[in-house]
Image (cartoon, rainbow, N blue to C red):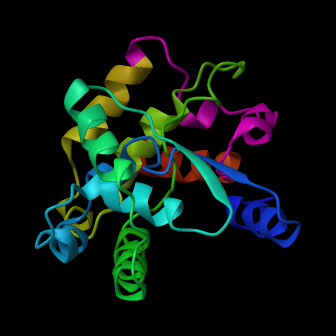
C-alpha cells in the first residue's frame, strides 16, 4: 500500500497520522531549477514547504523530519513553533512543483538503503539509481558519456555487484518503503551503464 492510500485509510477511520521523511531523505531539499523558482519569492526554506505541506493535512499529529545540522533544526522549529497551514494557493504551488520534479526523475528512489543490507549480490542499488537518474535528466541525455559511467565502474571495482548481477530474489522489493520495482529498474541501469 502506498503512503497516500495509508493516509486516506487513517483519515477515513479518524486515526492520527505520523509522517516520516516529508523531505524524502533530503531529495526535496534540492529541487530542479524550474521547481525551485516557484518558491524563491518566499522567505521560507525549500524543505519547509514539504514539511508544512504534510503538516497541513487532516489528522496529521506529528511530522518527523531528519536534520543534519543545528541550522536545519533551528529552521524547522522556527516555522513549526507558530504553525500556519498552507493556503489553497500554496498547496497548488506544491502540486505544480511535484509535477516538475516527477517529470525529471526516472527512478524515484530516496536513497534510504533499506534494500542493500540483505542483497546477496551486494548491489549498490540506491547509488546506481542516483547515477542513472542524473544521466536521465533532460539536459544530460544527449551527452552520451558522462562521469557517471566512471562512477558506476568505480563502485563495481570497490566491491559492489553490478546491476546485471541481480538474481531477482526480491528481498530488496519486500523492504522498499517506496514500493519500487527494483529488479526491473536494475535492468535499466545495467542496460545503460554496462553497454
Residue 194 seen anywhere in this rendered image of the structure: no
Q: Where is residue 88 in the image (x, y as percent from the top left)?
A: 42, 87
Question: Up-down: is 35 above or below 147?
Answer: below
Image point (29%, 63%), residue name: 137
Q: Which residue lies most toward the top here?
A: 159
Q: Is residue 195 left or right of residue 59?
A: left
Q: Residue at x 25, y 25 (%)?
A: 69
Picture coordinates of residue 126, whole percent (x, y) = 49, 36
**Which residue, as the protein is rendered here, is positioned at the far right?**
13
Give, as a single range, the part of the protein colored magenta.
157-180
Residue 143 is left or right of residue 79, and the answer is left
Quarter holding residue 58: bottom right
164 and 4: which one is in front?
Answer: 4
Q: In which image quadrant can residue 11 be found?
A: bottom right
Residue depicted at x 46% and y 62%: 106
The quarter in which the N terminus is drawn is bottom right
Q: 152 or 7, which lies in front?
A: 7
- Within the magenta stretch, is there residue 52? no
Q: Identify the residue at image location x=82%, y=33%.
A: 169
Q: How many marks?
A: 0
Taking 1 as reference, is 170 above or below it?
A: above
Left or right position of 191 against 130: right
Return the residue found at the far front: 82
Q: Does the magenta stretch include residue 166?
A: yes
Q: Where is residue 138 in the image (x, y as percent from the top left)?
A: 26, 70
Whether residue 2 is visible: yes
Our reading of the magenta stretch's main secondary structure is: loop
Q: In this view, does 50 lie above or below 147?
A: below
Who is closer to the viewer here, 168 or 41?
A: 41
Amino acid at each position: 500500500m502506498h503512503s497516500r492510500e495509508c493516509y486516506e485509510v487513517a483519515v477515513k477511520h479518524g486515526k492520527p497520522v505520523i509522517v516520516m521523511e516529508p523531505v524524502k531523505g533530503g531529495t526535496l531539499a534540492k529541487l530542479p531549477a524550474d521547481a525551485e523558482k516557484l518558491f524563491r519569492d518566499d522567505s521560507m526554506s525549500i524543505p519547509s514547504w514539504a514539511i508544512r505541506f504534510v503538516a497541513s493535512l487532516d489528522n496529521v499529529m506529528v511530522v518527523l523530519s531528519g536534520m543534519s545540522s543545528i541550522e536545519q533544526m533551528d529552521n524547522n522549529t522556527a516555522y513549526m513553533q507558530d504553525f500556519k497551514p498552507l493556503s489553497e494557493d500554496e498547496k497548488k504551488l506544491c502540486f505544480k512543483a511535484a509535477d516538475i520534479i516527477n517529470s525529471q526523475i526516472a527512478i524515484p528512489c530516496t536513497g534510504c538503503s533499506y534494500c542493500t543490507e540483505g542483497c546477496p549480490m551486494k548491489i549498490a542499488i540506491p547509488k546506481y539509481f542516483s547515477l542513472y537518474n542524473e544521466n536521465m535528466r533532460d539536459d544530460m541525455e544527449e551527452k552520451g558519456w558522462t562521469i557517471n559511467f566512471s562512477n558506476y565502474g568505480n563502485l563495481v571495482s570497490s566491491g559492489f555487484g553490478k546491476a546485471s548481477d541481480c538474481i531477482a530474489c526480491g528481498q530488496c522489493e519486500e523492504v522498499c518503503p517506496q514500493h519500487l520495482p527494483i529488479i526491473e529498474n536494475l535492468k535499466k541501469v545495467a542496460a545503460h551503464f554496462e553497454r
